[in-house]
Image (cartoon, rainbow, N blue to C red):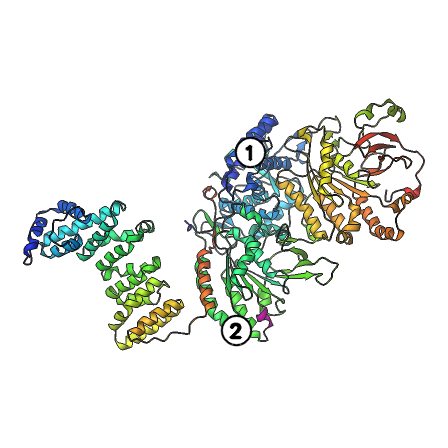
Amino acid sequence: MPSDDTPSLPYAEIAPVLLEVIYDSLFIIYNARFEGCNEFEMNKALVECALKLEPKRSTRNNPHILEGLEKTDGGLPRITRLCLEAVEHARNPAFDSDGESQRGIFVPSPLAIMVNALTVPSCPESAAYGFALARAVLFSHFKIHPPTSDLPDDWAELPIADFQDAIESFRIYAKHRDNIHHSKNKPARVFIAHFLAMSGFFILRFGTAGRQTMEATDAQRACLEFLRGKQFLRAEPDNNGQFEFRIAPGLVDLPDTQELLNSLMGVPVAIAGGATVFFGGLQRAHDNSLVMSVSGSAGTGKTSFALGLAASLAPFGTKCLYCTFEEDAETLERRAISLVPQYFRRATLPNLEEGWLHPVNLDPTRIKSVKSFVLEYLPVIKEQLAAVMKPADPSKDSLPGVAPVLVVIDSLTTIIESPETSQLEDFCTFVNELKQLHCIVLLLSAEGIPQGSRLEYLVDSVINLRHEHLDVAKEKPVRLFRLVKSRLQMSRPGSHVLHLSGERGFRISPQLPSQLDSHKIHKTPLPEFSEVLDTLRMDGKGASDPRQRELLNAVIPERLINIYPRSKILIHGHGSSGKATIALRILMSHSLVAKTGEKAKSNLSHKRSRILAISFLYPEKFYFDTFRTLSYGMSAESIPDLDVMALTPGFIGPEDFVDRVLLEIERGHLEGKPYTGVLLDGLHNTFLQFPALQENPMVWPALYSLLSHHELTIVTTFTTFSKTHPSRTRHNSDDEELILKGQLPFLHVIVQGTDFYLTVEPRDPKHHDRTFHITVESALGQRIPSVALRWNADNHEFEKFDELDPAPPDPQLRLPFV
Amino acid sequence: MTKQTPNSYKPGVDRLEDMNKQALVAWLEAELRGQMHILAGKEEDYPVQAIVNHHPYLSIATQRRVGDALESLVLDWRKDLSAWPEASVRALLSLVAELGVEGAKRKLLPLVSDRRVWGQIAVLQPAVLRALATLSLNEDRMFWSQLPQQYPEFAGMAFQVLTRIAADDALQLLSRIPDNGIAVGSVARTLPDFLSQFSPERTIAILNQLAGAIAKLSSESAANLKQALEDSGYSISLPPCPSKEKEDFCKTMNSFAKKARSTNRLPLEFAHAF
């Protein structure tokens, strides 16, 4: 057995019971589905099952895992919501049916749900900890591990080439949405398939045994047996191969093989943005070493980066030896504390109280030369580390460490600046020895490693930090994280934005192309044509007004236009016409089955709508007040949830903005309450108050593209400037020109990206009331109606339909791009 | 009786001669627990000194029976460590050492090797080791050589014993003296006497070897050892004093190495799944 002080993997205490709850919850859900049980009874059983997690009243009680367990308001706990969502998400009858009946039963990997449950929703980067644990569970279960220098004796090594072959073979199946067989004779392939399922790329499919298609009842029995068997918690190897794998419904392809390799073998990066930049993980050399150089002038954040990396690795049991020539040990320790993420203090992440940081203060004035340093100190390091970095204990609960030792040298500046080349040579000897001790070595310096030097060849990854706009008063200073080289792995080189402080602390906001690239395998869901949002129709009394029928030649459209869930809508028009309210009304409306007009099945009780309002205009209170007014009269269970992200005018950059929106969408998924609608309110205001967003033409296409990978109805509001409506010109023409310079192409992008283009304009300039006409300028797959819907902005009502003037509009007044 | 028994001891000696082993065990236990005194002596002689005083006048057979009885009592205490008062255990251990009950050694050694049990008798640890030290012979050198690795605080005592039972092993121990104040102090007290048994040439070689060992110690420990040697007329040239940085570095590396591990541990529920 390993000694008691072997560091545990993250969440070791809660993970077994959590996985048990997940298996049981999935069993309840599928059993209820097969038996046709009602949703209420199923939810009751699910809540009871979740209570096995037993909330504890201590500071470190993993509130993110236990969320909702102590509530008595009838809401479902987070773990239950995650299971329900995962099951919903795994369903994909469109690709697996023979006309009417669904053939396969799709089941998400319980380990994938466990990883999500262990992730703190507001910090998606914390997924690294759950991922490391789930990956270790698979390694242990199959006794298979990628090549490493300290593999237990009775484990099999998974050669990299075999992994690559398997992935490419799976990719062919996945692209054709074929089943991937589960062959007991090839445990390595089964392991890889489970690894992909655990990562969320595959789902399990019951319905075929070998080449034979199973009867529906047999498939159901196999599915329930699998869930009852609790594969990764019990001794049985698996369910006799009664299931296969299939690519997850939301994906068009598997990630790049190199990215999967990084996930399989690399050190998971628990730094926000780190997984995107480093393609899923930090890859180490064959001897488990990794040498990284981080350069940058004073104040660019080298030490903070090193400490932040060390803190993020601490829950894996990584011990950091921090050799500093610059700061004293106490200051370093104090700085390190400030870089520990807040959620560490509430979660049962291990190894945080046991001295993960070991600072050593070295006085450069007393160390005569690098050689004397190496001669004096290296034997001490070797003697001490050689004893601990020995091969893994072949006992059952021990496996190769995630990243045992991190050595930071802060900094090399004096060595690099030294005129004696031997200094650098001697230092190379030192680094080489550390590599042989399987260490991750971080070399900090003001200047980069000299080109052509031996040290340059020893360094695997090169990072350069910069602090820009420091001497420009009107610009906000920005830190840049430049990944120059990563020899051992595929990554996303280039400049990314680095943050050291602020609400979320130490993090990287990847550049827009990287963010786009990281989502390229995700499908873009089309609007849900089988359903229609119950909106843009007359409210209350107006519906039965006989004069209306007469006016409209007895053809009363039920709605102005049929808006499908998951479509993109632009509301463009007059200022103060209540566009945000119209948008909220659209997003708050429930969906109906297009053919029958009945309430759609997507309105399951656990699946309450959730709206994210991103405001460039109003403060949060405006949306909550409007939302409250609109909710009046709605049944409690049909009122959606609303979250508001009100952006303060200023210098938020494109990377941070997109990153922040995506983080919020991701938070929704991880909470088990995904957003169903997004309101982008007042986009025109970016031209006045968000200059950094205006300057980058890629922001909006990128944001729309990224949001379109999620199942969201997106409503954008945009106020018409007077230039597009000359009749309302009151402004200084120079200002107008300035604004229009950026506005027109911007509008073009938005209009091109929308499925529905609505305008809101005053009904009649002679009327000074607050009634407006909503007209349709373009609509997906439908004729443009010849009527307008009258909107009363004071009482938030769609009052009636008005016949539009049949005369062609003045071309001067036509909106562009339609 | 092997010697002329003093008159005052005769009644006591006669009573002990008449006792079988069982009776001796009962009497010794009562004597050690302070419940009865049947032997002649002053107040401060009880219980250990009075028995030691009478012991030489007992027949060989009775001496052996007393030894067996003491062994039984050691075993008795080991079975239930909390059943015996501390003072009684100290008396028992002293008696075992004074009377040279060799058989007791085998019964005391398991106490040292079991960390859990050893922790339970923290206050009695020196007494147990003293008893073992007294009873140790050359064949026990392995035990004393390895003791400092397990319990560095007793390295001094180990050195003292080894100087008596295995001088070469004592020399080897000198090259790996743990940096522990108590241990270093104890070595410092024993060292001059130990060195006096060697020829001048050998002494110089030993001092050179010692200089290397001292260099690894903290400056305070090194100074103590050097002082003890100089006080006894030995001169030793130490390598230049390591810098404060190096000392701090070694300390940090030491605590770092204690914490760092090359493996991770998986929850048993998962590890037992296969």
The secondary structure making up most of the magenta span is helix
Residue assigned mark 2: A369
Give the left or right position of residue A590, taking residue A505 as reference: right
Residue assigned mark 1: A25
Q: Nearest the camera: B3 or A380?
A: B3
Label ID, residue B255: none
- Residue A46, given in percent of the width and then of the height, sits at 56, 31
Residue A131 drawn in magenta: no
- What is the magenta range? A413-417
How packed is label 1: few (under 14 Cα within 10 Å), some, or many (20 or more)? Answer: many
- Residue A266, given in percent of the width and then of the height, sits at 56, 53
Q: Residue furthest bottom?
A: B201
C-alpha distance separating marks 1 and 2: 64 Å
Please state which amino acid type lies under the numbered disc 1: Ser
A520 lies above or below A766: below
Q: Residue at x 52, y 39 (%)?
A: A18
For label 1, the SS is: helix
